[in-house]
Image (cartoon, rainbow, N blue to C red):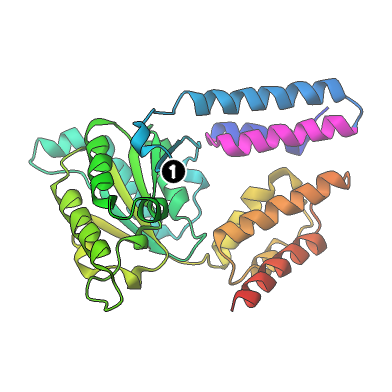
Amino acid sequence: MATAEQIKALIRSHVNMNAEQFYTSALQIAAHEARRGHSGLAHDIREMVDRAKEKVSAGNVIAFPQELSGLILTEQRVRPLSSLVVNKALKSRIERVILEFRQQQKLKKHGLDHRRKLLLSGEPGTGKTMTAQVLATELKQALHIIQMDRLVTKFMGETGAKLRQIFDRIRTAPGIYLFDEFDAIGGERALGNDVGEMRRVLNAFLQFIENDASKNLIIAATNNPALLDRALFRRFDDVLHYTLPNKESRKELIANLLSSFLSARFPLEKAAQAGCGLSHSEIDRACRDAIKISILKDKKHVTYTSFNELLEERHAAYQRKE
């Protein structure tokens, strides 16, 4: 029988419409049952979770033309707004994008358009891609991710033509379009080391995004806003800046992710302090690794010692980079 904490976590994730956490909680129950010798029940739960994930993925994939194969990836991760841990000001601006999209007809009656061209900037792992997933979930749209690095390296000389095809798809196929690693083409045109081809590609992108009249959300994400051409900023309706989580955000993130594996004695304040300087993504990985360790050791809860060791591993990785 699943523990009371596991049942509460399962119900909480369902109420919050957090499918990712729901699957995690269900798999935690399966692991618990397996440890108790109920292997048949554990197997059935895992199979149900796998089938649910496959159903979600299969139902949301839009076939793109062969020439765009590999450049546009369509995914559907259920990420409700409640799962996004960012500062209040940033979350408020994201909520405004959602509200305007939902009420776009009301705005149209007054001759106004909803904001739909967004530039997301900030360090890696601070929530930019997750924001696109949240917007897709809240607005019930498929998320199409354009792989900018592959677009440039694979089709050098044809990049402008590929961009035109992508914007043609944006005009005709509903969804949210994320230009990931956008600085691959968005570099400052005045830089002396830029090549003519890339200047032409950037000029083409500026024209395409300015002339786009679709109703779809277009999102560009960059880890290096300083590298972007200044002309880009005025082409977007909103520019959202992402930062590393503060102490309160780290506490919320750890509590959400550890969920039923978080005991009443776990020093959450101390753990949040130990995570100072790490991104949302790094803390997410440390939490998931800590849960794995607990499961493999047949423990009901994550210990601070093992969690802190995982955080130290993340800190050490950054020190090696520097």
Q: Please state which of residues 168 and 281 is positioned toward the viewer in this rendering.
A: 168
Looking at the image, residue 269 sits to the left or right of residue 167; the answer is: right
Q: Position of residue 121 (x, y in %)?
A: 38, 63
Query: Magenta residues, as a range?
Result: 16-35
Q: Is residue 237 above or below residue 100?
A: below
Q: Is residue 318 above or below residue 72?
A: below
How packed is label 1: few (under 14 Cα within 10 Å), some, or many (20 or more)? many
Q: Residue 65 falls in which quadrant of the image?
A: top left
Q: Please state which amino acid type lies under the numbered disc 1.
A: Val
Q: Residue at x 74, y 63 (%)?
A: 310
Looking at the image, residue 132 sits to the left or right of residue 232; the answer is: right
- The local secondary structure at tag 1 comes to helix
Asked if the stretch drawn in magenta spans residue 304, the answer is no
Q: Residue at x 51, y 67 (%)?
A: 244
Q: Residue 225 falls in which quadrant of the image?
A: bottom left
**Most frequent secondary structure within the magenta stretch:** helix
Image quarter of the N terminus: top right
What residue is pinned by disc 1? 134
Asked if the stretch drawn in magenta spans residue 32, the answer is yes
Q: Residue at x 52, y 26 (%)?
A: 56
Q: Position of residue 267 (x, y in %)?
A: 74, 62
Q: Residue 187 falls in which quadrant of the image?
A: bottom left
